[in-house]
Structure formats: C-alpha cells, structure tokens
Amino acid sequence: VIEPPAATEPAAHGRQAAPEPEGDAFTHDLVACGHALAGEAPGVWGHSATVERVIQALHSRLVEIGVGPSTEVVSFPPVMSRRTLERSGYLEGFPHLVGSVHGFAGRDPDRARLLNRLQAGADWGDLQVQSDVVLVPAACYPVYPHLSGALPASGRELNLFAYCFRHEETAEAGRLRSFRVEEFVRAGDAATCAAWRDEWLERGHAFLAGLGLDVRRELASDPFFGRAGRLLAADQRDRRLKWELQVPLHSETEPTAVASFNRHDDHFARSFGIDLDGGGVAHTACVGFGVERVALALLRAHGLAPERWPTGPRRELRL
Amino acid sequence: VRRTDEELAATVRDVLRRHARLAVDPDELDGGADLYDAGMTSFASVNVMLMLEEEVGVEFEDRMLSRATFQTIDSVRDALRELLDVAAATAAAGARA
C-alpha cells in the first residue's frame, strides 16, 4: 500500500522527488548503473535495455530447450477471467496475493467526489467497482480452461511466456510484484506428469548451472495464506509436490528461488474438467522460470556488463 | 462437561460430511480409514480444520497442522481430545490460582 503524499508537503522544485531505493547492496548497484529503475511502488521495477536483452535471451534459449514437436506454444494477456481464477481455487490458498482489476462505474456526481478525494490525497478505492478480470497470478492459470474435456492419448504440453502479478511488498530488486515467467504445462496421466516434472527439474538445474550459477535444489511450498495455509504448505511438502531451484541474488546464504517445478495432481483437472483419453480425471504439472530473477542473478554472478561475462554463459545465451 | 471420545468422533464425522467432499458417507468409514484416499483434497481438509475449530471451540496447534493430523477420523479426534484436555487443565489451574 502506498501512502498518498501528504497534501501539505510541497514537492521539491515542483516535482516529485525520486523514491529512495531501499534494499541490499546489489539492488543499490543495479540502480546506480541504471539496470534497475525504481518506481514509486515497491516491487514494481523497470530495467535497462541490457537487462531486457538478457531476459529475451533466456526466453529464446528456454523455448529452444523446452519446445518439442508436440508442444503447443500459446500466449495470453496479463489479465484473465475472474471466473477462471475463482474456479481454480487460488482464492482459497492465496487471497492475499490476488491482483483484482477495478474500474470507475460512477456518474457525474461520483466523478466530482473522486476528484475531490484525489485533491485531498485521500483514498478513492471505494469509488471503484470490481471488474470481471484479474491480473494473472501464475502463468499457467489461463491455460486450464482450454484443456477441458478429454485429452489426447499422449496428453498435452504447452509453453507460454507471460506476465504474472503477486500482491506482495518488498524492496528487493529481485522480488517483483509484476514479472515474467517462461512456463511449461503438462496434462496427462499421473505417471506422465510426475516423470515430466522430474525430468524438467534435472533439465532446469543443468541449464542454470551451465550459465555459471550456483544452483541449489530445495523442496518447497507455496506461500499459502494464514494458519490454514500452514496445513496446505505442510501437505505440499509431505507429498513433495514443489521443488525450487535457488541461486544467490540478494544473499549468499539465503538464495532466491528462480524456477519452480510443480505437480498439481488432479487439483486443476478436477476444477476444469480435464479428463484422460480412457476416462478418469487427468493430472497436471507445470514448470516456471522467473526470467527477471535469472537475469539479475547472472548480473550478480558475472558482472553488470554481459559483454564482459565469461564465454560459457555468453555462448549459451548467444549474448 | 467432558465430551466423550464417541461424541468427538461424531462431531468429526458431521463436519466431514458437510465439508470434506468425500466420495462416501463418513459413517461408512472406519475410524482408521484414510480420508485422503476417500477423496478429501488438501483444500477440503482446510475447510474441515476451520469448521472443527469453530464447532469444538479450540485452535489446532501449529505442530498439528499436517497431513497426519487430518488423515483419519481417529487422528482428528485424538488431536481434538488433546486440545480439549489441555484447555481443561489450564482452566482448572486458573480456577485454583
């Protein structure tokens, strides 16, 4: 939540002062050299052409690695149907992370109220009405309604590159609220999805290690909300549903997750009526690489100028 | 009044019937039958947990928030029994003090 500027406080030299970037030494370095552009909202960053070039290189390389002859490459906007999100169970697990899109639905008198509030620096959220779309919380969510019905005998595999949004606050350059994920989704029988996830974990580990990153593999759980969330997280760990690959980003001792490898069992398939060829509920799995985080981890590991990186990662990414 | 184990198990079955979305009626399940095998999802187990807390008036301790606690009717009942006994002992100690 951003505090509105106090109405009585004059802005320096008639313009808004640039926000003071917070966070660790690496974040400061990124800001100082112009790679990270801090906005007024924490966790919402722009970045330089150099960073974007690394991100696009990661995207291209992951597509080369992961897209096979039977992979369907699809694309969705950063917003999705609210109804789809409601059906997915996301609100049961992560009510605190949802980015819900609202719009003004008032008449002329309400417009005057809105402008008065803005002038006073007061809240105006109650003059907004929730719309039928939400921000995409994880890249795979818009995919599932399209998988409804009976799958082909070999199941389906999809790839997409998508913006995701998590409503979480932080000052670290790597913990973004809006970020892109190179995502792969598999739907099929239980054994197929489990094997696919495990293969991707090996493949992802080899890819990141090949870029010269110090990769750690951790059994993980999602940031489920509240006390009930502890039960969901414990259950997720007990069943070894989620693995993460972590690399040093803001700290050597507490590495940051840059990729996750997830089995959903029949959670999404039940919600969206995804069935096996021979009958019965399918399973799904997904794999996501947080490309901004990987790009920043590479800059931390090899230096802020990719043209001076070691040849290994440069060749791998054709930079 | 101390609730009997039978009464607690009946409460568990009642909450399961309403919130666990099981494939069978909980009355048809043994106390030791695996509720996840009977169709309870992890999301449904959260509803069961929250509704039991409301019905019985206790709060599961953090260490109890695991798959093992909600695995069977007996394991849920035992957790509730423990919480109620601790609450009763605490209340008695408070009354003496």
Image: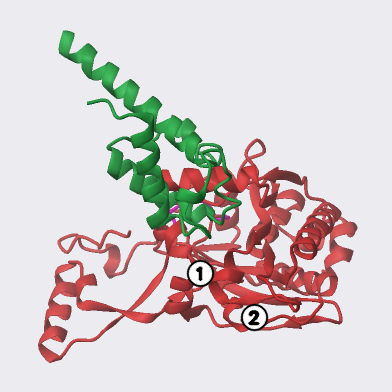
Chain colours: A red, B green
The amino acid pointed to by label 1 is: Ser
Quadrant containing the N terminus of chain B in the rendered view = top left
Residue B65, position as x, y percentages in the image: 48, 38
Outermost residue, bottom side: A108
Residue A134, position as x, y percentages in the image: 43, 75
Residue A215, position as x, y percentages in the image: 76, 46
The residue shown at (29%, 24%) is: B87
Few, some or many C-alpha atoms within 10 Å of disc 1 (few <14, some 14-19, many ≥20)?
A: many
Decide which of tag 2 and tag 1 comes sooner along the chain. Answer: 1
Q: Is residue B48 left or right of residue A193?
A: left
Q: Secondary structure at mark 1?
A: helix
| Residue A36 visible within the image | yes
Few, some or many C-alpha atoms within 10 Å of disc 2 (few <14, some 14-19, many ≥20)?
A: some
Quarter of image, res A201: bottom right
Residue that label 2 marks: A147
The residue shown at (17%, 79%) is: A114
| Residue B61 visible within the image | no
- The span shown in magenta is A167-174
Residue that label 1 marks: A88
Give the number of the disc on residue B37: none
Q: Chain of mark 1?
A: A
Q: CA distance from mark 2 to mark 1?
A: 13 Å
Q: Is residue A12 left or right of residue A252?
A: left
Main secondary-structure element of the magenta-colored stretch: loop
The amino acid pointed to by label 2 is: Leu
Q: Is residue A54 above or below residue A296?
A: below
